[in-house]
């Protein structure tokens, strides 16, 4: 079973034919302990073929979308044509995106700025995605390239087409974006000799060491030290090996809820489990959506204070959760890290105005910070 899929006649298949054959084989093979190894190898072969196909078609570049990132974070509205992205953009930002009752109203990327709790959040209305976008259908590659540079994806789903949700997730996945996930805790260090040595700090339930070794060999890695610190599957291992994936948060929003009965809405909610239900046209749920975007971007507010002066509590500096004093210094001025002496912090510190000398100190929302330089 652990063989490379190919043409039974002995003739060399085209890359696309091999990809299709492998996808069918994976979908037909029931996953269990006995088939675990074979499926892992099939997926490694498939990933290799897709990279080859991508490289082959890379020279045929169409007109791309040039979008300058601005503000305190970028959100991309992703959905099929006529789902209501333009209406939602206009409801949440200062944009004036064309709105029509027919497909493909938006033919380019239209930006807007969502101003919320002093944050300036860029929201991008991109052309509607169709099936096959990751492969280039309907300017799909350009749209998905914009997504890879965003900070948050907003899946907008028409209440009458809940099936679009899985299709959108697949297109995003095929474009190399992993939503609501983190980089797997796996370290691979290539060596000159010694074969593949796999070490784990957890029990692996979805892979065995033999499968790990053979997947690496599919990617021409014959000598390496591998340390796995979490229970990963074959797809996650392949992502680590390829090291070209983007990890982004995402929210799912169900639109046009004013056009459906409550019973029907509840059935759809059970099916796709949206984070929020709205009506962009009737302005239902828009305030809740703004708050959800703000939280998902993990924004915090930092108030700055000068020595012997009151803190500026009118306009905070926008930062992100888990940021440190070093991050704050870098945002204010590139030389501040070298010139930093200490900081006094009110809010998250153990007592008001506590002196902090470590740049690694983690800041919290609404902290008041007074920086002292050498």
Image (spheres, rainbow, N blue to C red):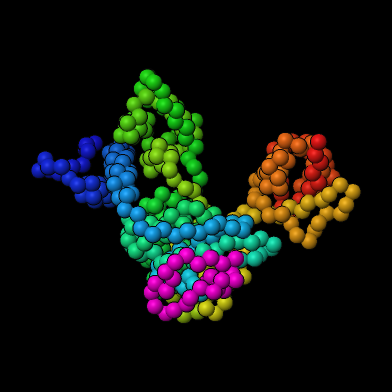
Which residue: 75% across, 60% down? Answer: 315
Q: Is residue 112 magenta?
A: yes
The quadrant in which the N terminus is found is: top left
User: Is residue 278 at all visible to an observer of this figure?
Assistant: no
**Horizontal arrangement in the rendering, residue 219 relative to residue 267 (left or right):** left
Q: Position of residue 53 (x, y in %)?
A: 29, 47
Image quarter of the C terminus: top right
**Residue 278 forms part of the magenta stretch:** no
Identify the image quadrant of residue 145: bottom left
Q: How many marks?
A: 0
Q: Residue at image x 45%, y 38%?
A: 231
Question: In front: 76, or 373?
Answer: 373
| Image x and y of residue 88, in percent | 52, 72
Residue lying at the far left of the rendered structure = 9
The residues colored magenta run 88-113
**Res. 47 image quadrant:** top left
The residue at the far right in this view is 308
* Residue 272 spot, x, y in % from top left: 44, 63
In this orientation, does residue 235 appear? yes
- Reply above or below: 238 against 121: above
Q: Residue at x 44, y 31 (%)?
A: 188
Q: In the displayed orientation, state which residue is furthest to the top.
A: 194
Q: Measuring from the top left, give residue 93's x and y in whole percent.
A: 59, 70
Residue 274 versus residue 182 in the image, above or below: below
The residue lying at 61 percent from left, 66 percent from top is 114
Q: Is residue 64 left or right of residue 117?
A: left
* Along the viewing direction, whichever of 269 and 297 lies nearer the viewer: 297
């Amino acid at each position: 079973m652990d063989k490379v899929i190919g043409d039974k006649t002995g003739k060399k298949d085209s890359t696309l034919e091999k990809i299709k054959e492998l996808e069918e084989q994976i979908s037909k093979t029931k996953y269990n302990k006995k088939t675990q190894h074979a499926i892992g190898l099939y997926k490694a072969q498939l990933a290799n073929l897709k990279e080859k196909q991508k490289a082959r078609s890379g020279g045929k570049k169409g007109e791309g979308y040039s979008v300058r990132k601005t503000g305190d974070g970028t959100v991309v509205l992703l959905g099929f044509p006529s789902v209501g992205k333009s209406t939602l953009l206009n409801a949440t930002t200062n944009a004036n995106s064309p709105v029509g009752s027919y497909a493909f109203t938006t033919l380019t990327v239209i930006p807007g700025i969502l101003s919320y709790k002093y944050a300036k959040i860029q929201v991008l209305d991109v052309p509607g995605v169709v099936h096959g976008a990751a492969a280039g259908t309907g300017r799909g590659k350009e749209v998905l390239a914009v997504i890879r540079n965003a900070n948050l994806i907003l899946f907008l789903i028409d209440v009458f087409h809940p099936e679009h949700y899985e299709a959108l997730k697949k297109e995003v996945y095929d474009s190399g974006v992993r939503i609501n996930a983190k980089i797997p805790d796996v370290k691979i260090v290539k060596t000159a000799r010694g074969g593949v040595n796999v070490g784990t700090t957890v029990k692996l339930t979805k892979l065995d060491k033999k499968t790990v070794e053979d997947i690496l060999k599919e990617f021409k890695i014959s000598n390496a030290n591998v340390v796995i610190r979490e229970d990963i599957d074959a797809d996650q291992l392949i992502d680590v090996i390829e090291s070209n994936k983007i990890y982004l948060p995402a929210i799912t929003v169900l639109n046009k809820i004013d056009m459906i009965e409550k019973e029907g809405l509840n059935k759809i909610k059970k099916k796709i489990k949206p984070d929020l239900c709205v009506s962009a046209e009737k302005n239902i749920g828009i305030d809740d959506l703004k708050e959800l975007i703000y939280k998902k971007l993990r924004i915090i507010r930092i108030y700055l204070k000068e020595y012997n002066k009151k803190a500026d509590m009118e306009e905070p500096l926008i930062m992100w959760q888990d940021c440190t004093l070093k991050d704050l210094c870098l945002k204010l001025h590139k030389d501040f890290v070298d010139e930093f002496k200490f900081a006094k912090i009110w809010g998250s510190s153990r007592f008001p105005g506590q002196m902090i000398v470590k740049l690694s100190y983690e800041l919290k929302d609404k902290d008041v910070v007074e920086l002292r330089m050498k």
